[in-house]
């Protein structure tokens, strides 16, 4: 599926292809919650990194979150890159060198109508803010941390790959 996305002010727009475009994952980690706002979670989808085309690249800034594991004295810089518009602050996509073939656009930045997922996966619930209500529907899966099933595997299991 061809996806088109942009920031709020229009300084950055992008396109990419995605075989796995259903916005089914709701991540409640503090990084997603604080950088994406909204209902206390972010929704990421997966796209082909080689297909990414960007207009307004000079208006993109990159944020590396600081991570501090349980029992660690010092935080370390995440290798994941959260790309956002330096003009309006809109989150655009995440790139992680762990999966160099993938781009994870934030569903909130996608302008193309996305398909509606039949079920959702709620992840990082151990980091959910107390004020957030996870609206869990029938068939939804819940995880304190990350599920073992990848975005591609979820799409394939449900017969939803494009």
Image (tube, rainbow, N blue to C red):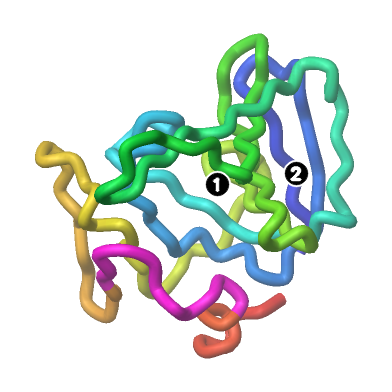
Tell me, for residue 107, which label it has, or none: 1
Q: Check the image and name the residue furthest to the left.
A: 130
* Residue bounds of the magenta highlight: 142-152
Q: Residue at x 84, y 24 (%)?
A: 57
* Residue 131: quadrant of the picture: top left
Q: Residue at x 21, y 56 (%)?
A: 126
Q: Nearer the viewer, residue 91 or 120?
A: 91
Q: Position of residue 152 (x, y in %)?
A: 61, 76
Q: In the picture provided, is 54 more to the left or to the right than 26?
A: right
CA neighbours of label 2 inside 10 A, class few (<14), some (14 to 19), many (20+): some
- In the rendered structure, find residue 132 and report the number of the disc placed on it: none
Kindly identify which residue carries mark 2.
Answer: 4
Q: CA distance from mark 2 to mark 1?
A: 11 Å
- Residue displayed at 37% across by 73% down: 119
Q: Residue at x 54, y 36 (%)?
A: 77
- Asked if one can make out residue 26 in the rendered structure from this viewpoint, the answer is yes
Residue 32 at least partly seen: no
User: Where is residue 122, by image quadrant?
Assistant: bottom left
């Amino acid at each position: 599926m061809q996806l088109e996305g942009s920031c709020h002010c229009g300084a950055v727009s992008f396109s990419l292809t995605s075989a796995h475009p259903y916005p089914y994952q709701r991540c409640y980690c503090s990084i997603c919650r604080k950088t994406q706002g909204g209902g206390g979670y972010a929704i990421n989808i997966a796209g082909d990194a080689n297909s990414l085309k960007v207009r307004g690249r000079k208006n993109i800034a990159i944020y590396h979150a600081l991570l501090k594991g349980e029992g660690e004295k010092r935080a370390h810089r995440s290798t994941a890159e959260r790309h956002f518009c330096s003009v309006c602050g809109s989150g655009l996509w995440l790139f992680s060198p762990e999966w160099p073939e993938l781009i994870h656009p934030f569903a909130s930045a996608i302008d193309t109508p996305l398909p509606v997922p039949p079920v959702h996966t709620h992840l990082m619930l151990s980091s959910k803010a107390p004020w957030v209500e996870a609206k869990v529907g029938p068939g939804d899966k819940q995880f304190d941390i990350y599920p073992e099933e990848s975005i591609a595997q979820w799409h394939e299991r449900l017969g939803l790959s494009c």
